Image (spheres, helix red, strand yellow):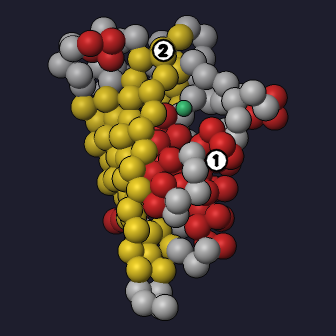
Amino acid sequence: MALEFRTGVGYDSHRFTEGRALILGGVRVPHDRGLAGHSDADIVLHALTDALLGAIAQGDIGTHFPPSDPQWKDAASTRFLAHAVGLARDQGYTVVNADCVVVLQRPKLAPHREAIRSSVAAILGVELDRIGFKAKTAEGLGPVGEEQGAECHAVVTVRRDG
Ligand code: MG
């Protein structure tokens, strides 16, 4: 079997709501609101999970962790990404790198960038220099610009040695 590289793309969005913690990339980010969802609504880990599942053609986060299943209520999304890493390993794939872009107006994520990168690197089992993380505002445009929610886009590349 030859050396093989595969890339997957992922996307997620959740609404802001009162009375929940804001968890991004497995890191609690201080804010006056959090994201609503069945699990902890971590858009970064959800987008990365879908990207990794896409790279190995194993469906999406909803097929592996149905929101209708009560066992995933308020679940830490670290479990979802760790599960995808396990599926990839089972097929002989290791993560090469991951990159993600969060879009939200507030709060500023720059002070939390390194903590989020470290958290994601640990879950994916790779060195810190293989993890990209960027945050952008929506320049006030659309629902994200009006602070109704936040989005994350992600790509993950994996390799399998022949
Ligand atoms: Mg989600």
Residue 77 image point, x, y percent:
62, 41
Q: Amino acid at mark 1?
A: Phe
Please tell me which residue lies in front, 111 or 19.
Answer: 19
Q: Residue furthest left?
A: 139
Q: Which residue is mark 1?
A: 80
Tell me the tag on residue 108. none
Q: Which residue is mark 2?
A: 16
The residue under the point 59% across, 62% down is 85
Please tell me which residue lies in front, 37 or 53.
Answer: 53
Q: Residues within 10 Å of mark 1 (few under 14, many from 20)?
A: many
Which quarter of the figure has residue 142? top left
Q: Can you say whether 124 is above or below 66 in the image?
A: below
Q: Nearer the viewer, mark 2 or mark 1?
A: 1
Residue 27 image point, x, y percent:
52, 39
Label whose residue precedes the other's in the sequence (2 or 1): 2
Marks 2 and 1, how far apart in space? 21 Å
Q: Amino acid at mark 2?
A: Phe
The residue under the point 53% across, 59% down is 57
Which quarter of the figure has residue 134? top left
The secondary element bearing badge 2 is classed as strand
Quarter of the rendered image showing ligand 1 = top right
The residue under the point 33% across, 24% down is 104
Q: Can you say whether 118 is above or below 35 in the image?
A: below
Number of callouts in the render?
A: 2
Which quarter of the figure has residue 146? top left
Q: Is residue 135 visible?
A: yes
Residue 153 image point, x, y percent:
36, 40
The residue under the point 51% across, 73% down is 94
Q: Is residue 136 left or right of residue 28?
A: left
